[in-house]
Image (tube, rainbow, N blue to C red):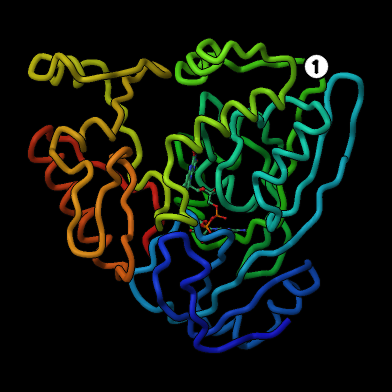
Amino acid sequence: MKIERNYNLSKLNTFGISVHAKLFVEIKNEDDLKGLFETPEFKNNQKLFLGGGSNVLFTKDFDGLVILNRLKGIEIIEEDGESVRIKCMGGEIWHDLVTYAVDRGWWGIENLSLIPGTVGAAPMQNIGAYGAELKDVLENVEAFDVNTGDKIIFNKEECELGYRDSIFKNGSKDKYFISAITLKLSKKEKKNLDYKVLQDHLEKNKIEVKNSKDVSDAVSHIRRSKLPDPAVILNAGSFFKNVFLQSGEFKKLQETYPEMPYFSEDNLIKIPAAWLIEQTGWKGKRVGNVGVHDKQALVIVNHGGAKGDEIQGLAQEIIYSVYKKFKIKLVPEVNVI
Ligand SMILES: Cc1cc2nc3c(=O)[nH]c(=O)nc-3n(C[C@H](O)[C@H](O)[C@H](O)COP(=O)(O)OP(=O)(O)OC[C@H]3O[C@@H](n4cnc5c(N)ncnc54)[C@H](O)[C@@H]3O)c2cc1C
């Protein structure tokens, strides 16, 4: 374990923003981490834990210690004929875990295929896609308290997982380093094919789902065709969260905008933030080095050489436009640092 100084982070965030960390260290095992806790660099500086950097926007140099999570390992803790409990270290790549599961015929995370980033960041915003969320399979989260160095196990309820949200993104922000998670997956067929886009893809391509890998392949295919790959165009996926309204509020809006798309979820009405952005004319627009993707209005892109505050500036303008038109305040999903 080597603590480096003035470390460039441009290759460690999918927006490709060139900022420097005053201090930087890569953690490969728990002993590294425990050793790090004892160092003055750890004790005397603010800290930022980083996985794949696919959900962060750096707006300035980080005046502290960036800790890159590379803790590896997947372990079966318990299994029977019905299900399997696996513990996965936080530095594993999320999609590698999905592949590990579907290759063994296990069900539960196949709809979450190809979400970029690490396993350790997955509970942060309760990753979700194609009708599934981490919370459907999560058993617990193992984390280190950054102040005491103690290891704590949070059960699912204690993580307070919500739509792109958790205790780690709110009240306990920056207080814990997530070192591992435990999932319970099913060995018995457990298809989750209700999500309309997935259903349509399966029908259109006459795909008969025989195993979880078929679902994973279908989701991967859809994602590749719809979402810009950060290796080709720098971005951090959806910049904003979708909007949830009480039905009364929604009905009032619907009187003015009867064409507004919506979905009923958990007694609330979900409105796609992408539609709201499209209506304000931002889709496909470019401002200097930054812009809104031409096929995905939720995705802000760095066309090259952008500074973090240019991206944040564009995000603010989008928030303002949407608020002016609909009186709805968009909330960023990306962690602005
Ligand atoms: C093209 C694209 C598509 C995407 N699609 C989806 C999608 O469908 N669904 C979805 O939910 N998300 C999606 N995302 C967002 C992103 O992939 C997820 O949020 C992912 O979980 C981030 O993982 P990461 O390792 O890159 O986290 P990072 O960006 O490195 O970190 C994100 C936040 O978590 C904190 N953090 C990271 N690791 C730890 C740790 N071990 N302990 C404590 N805190 C930590 C960081 O400090 C930061 O605040 C997409 C992103 C991209 C670029």
Q: Say whether residue 66 is left or right of residue 151.
A: left
Q: Looking at the picture, does residue 336 appear above or below residue 136?
A: below
The residue at the point 54 percent across, 40 percent down is 126
Q: Quarter-wise, where is residue 138 in the image? A: top right
Q: Looking at the picture, does residue 51 appear above or below residue 269?
A: below
* Count of number-bearing discs: 1
Q: Say whether residue 10 is left or right of residue 296.
A: right
Residue type at mark 1: give it.
Lys
Depth check, front residue: 295 or 20: 295
The residue at the point 30 percent across, 46 percent down is 293
Depth check, front residue: 292 or 149: 292
The residue at the point 68 percent across, 61 percent down is 144
Q: Say whether residue 211 is left or right of residue 326.
A: right
Residue 135 in picture, x, y percent from top left: 60, 33
Residue at label 1? 188
Q: Quarter-wise, where is residue 107 in the image? A: top right
Q: Quadrant of the C terminus?
A: bottom left
Residue 182 in picture, x, y percent from top left: 74, 42
Badge 1 marks a residue whose secondary structure is loop
Q: Residues within 10 Å of mark 1 (few under 14, many from 20)?
A: few
Q: Quadrant of the N terminus?
A: bottom right
Residue 280 in picture, x, y percent from top left: 13, 38
Q: Looking at the picture, does residue 64 appear above or below residue 243?
A: below
Residue 246 in picture, x, y percent from top left: 27, 21
The residue at the point 51 percent across, 18 percent down is 201
